[in-house]
Amino acid sequence: MEKNRFLGSCYQAIGLFISFVFLASCSMPKIFVLHDPLTPEEHITLGLSYERNGEYDAALNEYKTALKKLPIASLYIGNICFQHNDYTEAEKAYKVAVSKTDDPRAHNNLAWLYYISGRNLVEAEMHARRAVELSPDNQDFMDTLIKIVEKRKD
């Protein structure tokens, strides 16, 4: 067998298409993923599962993969950053989700971040009001708005 010979072509294994490339300088094949069989929504679902199990790095990787095609993944990235007290990155992620999706959860979470950090309370109220407007039956969103309005009065 020639040392520099390209062996194999694409094989389907466990839903992934892979190819093995044997190089003269290494004895182990390198595996390249040619096609991701998961949809962006499935990456988010997988990320949520990782997150529930406390595997935040794995969850973040899944959300970042989903973000390539699904802007709402920014909401989930923001949630992980928020949980780790990285408010700067959480704010950036929530702002992306707000601007690209106008999702009420993104508005609410950005408002809550501002409430917790005690800054931008005018903007916090604006986002909380938008969340309630988009989802008037969500009591959590209404609670966020009430707390922000109370804090602004202080």
Image (cartoon, rainbow, N blue to C red):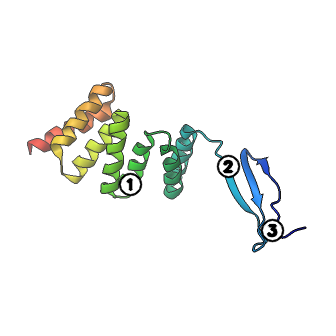
Spatial separation of the CA atoms under disc 1 and disc 2: 30 Å
Spatial separation of the CA atoms under disc 3 and disc 1: 46 Å
Q: Where is residue 2 in the image (x, y as percent from the top left)?
A: 87, 68
**Residue at disc 3, secondary structure:** loop
- Horizontal relation, residue 18 to residue 82: left or right: right
* Residue found farthest to the left: 154
Residue type (three-letter) at the residue carrying disc 2: Leu
Disc assigned to residue 4:
3
Query: Cβ–Cβ below 8 Å for labels 2 and 3?
Result: no
In the figure, residue 27 lies in which quadrant? Answer: bottom right
Vertical placement of 61 versus 2: above or below? above
Q: Which residue is drawn at 59% across and 38% down?
A: 39
The 10 Å Cα crowd at callout 2, few under 14, some 14 to 19, many 20 or more, is few
Q: Residue beneath label 2, please?
A: 34
Query: Cβ–Cβ below 8 Å for labels 3 and 1?
Result: no
Q: Classify the position of the N terminus by image quarter.
A: bottom right
Q: Position of residue 150 (x, y in %)?
A: 14, 40
**Residue at disc 2, secondary structure:** strand
- Horizontal relation, residue 152 to residue 77: left or right: left
Disc assigned to residue 81:
1
Residue type (three-letter) at the residue carrying disc 1: Cys
Q: Where is residue 117 in the image (x, y as percent from the top left)?
A: 23, 53
